[in-house]
Structure formats: C-alpha cells, structure tokens
Amino acid sequence: MLRASSILTNTDLQVEPEFEAGLDELLDACRQSLRSVDEDMIRRAFMLGYWAHRNDRRASGERFITHPIEVAVIVARDIGFDDISVVSALLHDTVEDTEFSLDLIREEFGDTVSNIVDGLTKIRGVSWNRELGQAENVRKLMLSMATDIRVILIKFADRLHNLRTIESLPKQKQLKIASETLDLFAPLAHRFGLNAIKAELEDISLKILHPEEYRDIVRSLRASKVERDGYVGRFIKPLRERLESDRFDFEMAGRSKNLYSIWRKMKRKDKPIEEIYDLLAIRIVLKSTGKKGKEDCWRVYSIVTDLYKPLPERFRDFISVPKSNGYQSLHTTVLGPTGRRVEVQIRTEEMHAIAERGVAAHWKYKEPVSDRDRGMEQFLVWVRDILENPNPEHATEFVKEFRLNLYDEEIYIFTPKGDLMTLPRDATPVDFAFQVHTEIGMHCIGAKVNGRMVPLSYKLQSGDQVEVITSKKQTPNPDWMKFVVTHKARSRIRHLINEKRRRSVDLGREMLEKKLDKAGLDVEEQKLRRAANLLKFPNAQQMFYEIGTGLFDAKDFVEFVRNESRGRKEEEEEFAEQEGLRLRYENFLDSAQVAARPALEIDGELHTDIVTRYAPCCNPIPGDDVFGYISRSDGIKIHRVNCRNAPSLLVNHPDRIVSVEWSRQKDVQFLSGLRVMGEDRVGMVSDITTVISKNLKTNIRSITVDSEDGVFEGTIVCSVTDLSHLRRLIERLKRVDGIHGVYRFEE
Ligand code: MN
C-alpha cells in the first residue's frame, strides 16, 4: 500500500528550483499573515502535493503543481486564517485528480486536514454540475461550510486562481465560470467579508463577460490617472500636515474602486464614467487600536470636515453599527478644492484588515466577541439551522440573499442541458423561449423554473434553470407584450400578432360580405366605412377584425345598415336587444323633475290630464313595460312591470291596477341617468359629450366626473325620448375608447 511516509522519504523526488521558489514564497506569506506556522507541516504537504501531481498539467500546459501552490499563497496572504488551511489548499485537488487517497492524507495530517480536503472534493461538482439545479448546489456549499468553514474559504482561493488563469479555457467555459462567480462566489465572499478576493473575482468576471466595457473603463481610468493623482495630492497635502502636527500614526492614500463596482454604478445610474464621482476616494488607516482607535477615527473625521465641507447625506458610521459581515469604517464625502467630491474612509489598521479579509482577520486581532463577530456568528448559526432542517425552500431563500449582489442589468439563465443564456433583468420565460428558438416562443404555454411550474409572466432570476413547455395549438398572446422585455421576443410577437390580425381582418370582411349578400344588401365601401364609424369602430379594419374573431356579429352590422336606411324604427329596439345588451332597466328620474306630463293611455283611453307620477323605485321611461297603480293620494303611479315592488302590488291590490301604455307621441323628453365607467384618459369627457350631443342630438342636463387611480367614473343626466333612444345612447357610449361599462343610473 502507498504510504505518505514512503513518498516523503523517497530520495528520487527532485523538486525543480522554480517550485522550490514557490514554496519559499508561500512560507514567507505564512510568516507574515499567520499567527503561528508549522513550517514542517507545510513542507510535507508541499512535497506530497508535488508528488501527487507530478504527472499532471493544466489546460495552459504548465505543471499542475503551480495551481495548489498559488491557491495556498492566496489562502495565506489574502485570507490568513491558519496553517491548516494552507496545508489543505496544497492538497485540495489531490484526491480527485490522482491515485492519492483521503486515508493517505489522514495518516499524515490527521482528521482535520482530511475532512477539509474531503469537503473540497465533494463541492467540486458545484462549479460544473448545473443539472442538479442551483438550490442543490447551494445546499452543497452550505454543507461544506457547516463541516468546516475553511472548506469554503479555500474554495474562494481556488476559484480566484482558476479565474486568474482562465484564458486557456474555451470561451464557453469561461463565460460559465464567470457568470457563476458573479452569481454565487463573489456575493458569498462578500458575505464573509473577503473584500479583496471579492473585488478581484468580480473584476475578472466582468472582463470575461463584458470585455468591451471592461476595456473602456480601464482605458478611461488610465487616461485620467495623472489628473486624478494630481488632484488627490492637492487634497491630501493640507490634511497630512494637520494629522502629522496632531501626532497621528497613520497611512493615507488614494483608493481606487474596483472596476466592477464602477461598471455597476454606471449601469445603475446610466451615466458615463466621468460622472461617477466617487472615483475620487482616499483612505486613512490609523495605527492606534482598541478604544483609542475608535476615538482617533472620530478625531480624524472632525479634522477632515474642518478642512473640507462635508455632504451630510453621504455620511456613514459603520463603526458604531458595523455591517453584518463585520465591516467597520467611517465614510464621508466632502467637497475638495474646486468643489469636487471626494469620498474619505477613516478606519484603524485592525478594521482595515477585517475590511479586506473579513472573517479570518479576527484570528489575528483576537479580542472578546464584539458586534463585528456577532454578525458572522449569526450568519453561521443561520446556515447550520437551514442544514438541520433540510428544506428546498430554505435553499432557495439562501440563493435569493446572495442575489442581492448580482448584476443589476443582466441575468444568467440555464437551459435544461446546462447551457448558459444571458438575458436582461426582468426577463420572463417567454423571453427565454424566444431566445432559444422562435418556434419555441410561439408555442410556449408554460414553464418550469428549477423544476416548478411558473406563470409565463414570471420574472426570472440569475441561476434559474428554465424548461419551456410548448403546445402545437398555442399561438402568441397579445398580453405577452405586457411583460416581455427582450427585443427579439417583442418583435416576433408583434409580427405574429399582426399576421394573425391580418388573417382575421380578411376573414371578417369575407364573412360580412357573405351576410350582406344573403340579406340582398349592396353596401358600397364608403357607406360601409361610415356605418362602421357610426358603430364607434375606429375604422372598418377594426370592425372586420372583430367580426373575424367573433367579437362582433356580422348579423348586427346587417341589421344596423338596414335600420339606418329605414330610419329609427321600433326594430332598432330589437337590434339593441340582439346586441345582447343586458341593461338594468333602472332609471334615474325623480318625479319632481318631470317637466312635461306625457300622454298615457289608461285602459285604452288617451289621457293627458290625469295626475300621474313615475314611481321612484323603478323610474320608467317610454318604451318600458309599465302598469299603473292608483294610489290613495298621489294619483296614478307608473311602475315598470319588472319593478321590485310589482309582485306585491299586483297580488295585494289587484283592484287598484290599471293597464297603461305609452302613447306614440315623441315630443316629450325624459330625463334619464347613466353611469359610465372606464379609463381616466385625456379627452374622455369631451369624447363622451361629443357622442351624446353631436352624434345623437341629445341634450345633456348634467355631467359629473370622478377619477381616481386612473379609473374614470361619470354620471350623466340627459334627456331622452324613449327606451330605444336610451339604448342607442348606451350602445354608442360603449364604443368610446377606454369605456368599460355603461349602465342606467341606479339611485
Ligand atoms: Mn483547484
């Protein structure tokens, strides 16, 4: 059996000088950053790693051992946790890639190292196996965190080195790794407070995903560098003098934001790089520690704002209230010489270490658990809690949390096969479907996101795996236009809808011509258009379309044309009925408002002199089916047959009932009330009044309008001659753009 001791004592093992140099660099980094270093253990791990990978090469062709060495250097320098993690980093790829076994590692370095290497081996799949779905990947990552936090810390270093050397991979793989880094690893690194690593992960990913924009930012920063440096120099000079005369021990330098943050800000604010003002930023790091350190930060703050006018709305105190990842600092933005904005960050060395290296740094600056650590501890408690109650919902929430730090403008979506697709923010499954193929977009009826059915309007999120469900019968729905965001989807849907519409228009015209033929009517084009207009269609095309799609019955048009030519006859009433108008025959008509007394035939005799009143419970108008009720003191009251009081009157007082009929006299005007509901749009009132007074020659008594939240509600009282007049009025009003309902007034 292969034994670690025999490998380590194998005298044939010759390490080339360049890798010896790598080991020296690593040991240097360890001595500088770690509290204590078992150099012998690191040497042994190095030798074992060297031996295990002796025949391996990277995609670039270079010797594989360069990778674990570099990862270990990052772990030592940028994370600085402990020597165990450095050893684990040196061995992190051995079990997966070589004949090396975990037993061998356990034998030589004990359980802790072998568990960490085991954890790293297990989460390797996370980066590639998209089939598992994002939530499952995240669960794996969390599992590794709970086993030993060092697993995930080393994973960050591994990912960073893989990104630094990503050039030799095929483009597709690069895109996948970069998007996944922005998706998961950068936000996670941020959560651990590993800001230096996070910034580099982001910048390299940006370079891969948006090479042009990346180059533009680099170029423009380079172009303005001399000028910016000069300005920062002028800004710093008086400040340095003040701080020195007050005997502060400090370091002060211009600070550059990472490129990805600049890029995001440009996108978010839709501004060119020149206008992202906190490009100018300086940082003051104080050497003092503990309570004095905090106090010194505030003293320096007061000196800075003494010299330069602060913008109060840009002040942040992360010392009293640290960020959840432990970050502490004072931030202020001041107006420098010539009024330029400069962001100033003030913190102690210790706070700075935590800002750069997060969770790991408190090992170096060990002190009682402070607020700073509490955030991280809560985070880990939360992680453990989720793991102890495995539930896919939680994993999804976890993913969501990380997404707070995602691209604002783009999301990365995976096909069921694991291929990557870039879509704009707020993209829906329909956008995705059209992106895959027009045919799929045209026929999509639903979608599964991460295995669950979602509505087509669902807003996708980075990392979602989307499966589109199609049906041959489905065709694009105009409603899709309300939520799709990609140009491709929009233009295809519009095109398909137009095509479908054209077919419906042709069909509608054909149907109408047939109906007119059958009715023996020959309607010339101009008359046809006029009639369509009278029916309140914006144009004849729209009418053909509505006929073609069954929204409007060609028969009704035929009837309308026939009636138009015969004038207003009673048939028009039928027409209105055929229209399917379900009018509620309540009428607004206060008896006191009746100006003229209409002629009524009572029991077959024409009377114009009998006192009649119109019952306020049903407000009849000529045309309604009515009966008379002889009241004790108020003359004859006219009720509609379908009045809610009719049954009781007819049953209880049959002796008081008289039959009445409207006489054919048309010179009498009745007041009638209408309620109109629709969209609150410009010109609504004038369109309504035009329809009423111009088209129908009706007098408007009053019109009151209420609009709220884009909803229009109007009450119109106007004079009508009879029921068919009122119905025609209702019919016309219904065709006004944006009107959804027209009803006879109910008290
Ligand atoms: Mn690796």
Image (cartoon, rainbow, N blue to C red):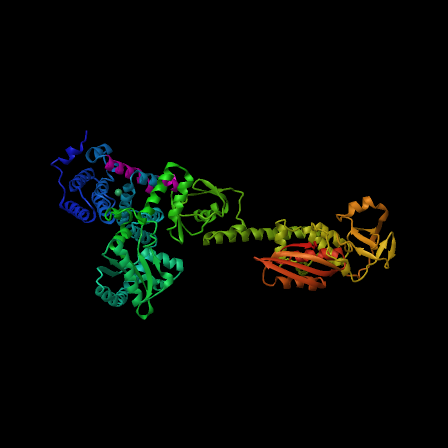
Residue 497's x, y, as percent? Answer: 54, 52
Horizontal relation, residue 720 to residue 636: left or right? left
Taking the magenta stretch, the answer to whether it contains residue 133 is yes
In the picture, which quadrant includes the C terminus? bottom right
Residue 159's x, y, as percent? Answer: 28, 46
> Quarter-wise, where is residue 595 in the image?
bottom right
Which is nearer the eye, 591 or 538?
591
Q: Quadrant of ligand 1?
A: top left
Which is nearer the eye, 556 or 368?
368
Residue 431's x, y, as percent? Answer: 46, 49
In the picture, which quadrant includes the N terminus? top left
Taking the magenta stretch, the answer to whether it contains residue 129 is yes
Whether residue 230 is situated above or below residue 457 in the rendered picture: below
Which is nearer the eye, 599 or 637?
637
Magenta residues: mostly which secondary structure? helix
**Most extreme residue toward the left, as rendered?**
11
Residue 129 in view, yes or no: no
**Looking at the image, how many numbered discs can be counted on the residues?**
0
Residues in magenta, as a range: 111-139
Residue 729's x, y, as percent? Answer: 70, 58
Residue 268 in view, yes or no: yes
Which is nearer the eye, 153 or 54?
153
Q: Residue at point 69% right, 62% down? A: 692
Q: Residue at point 35% right, 44% down? A: 378
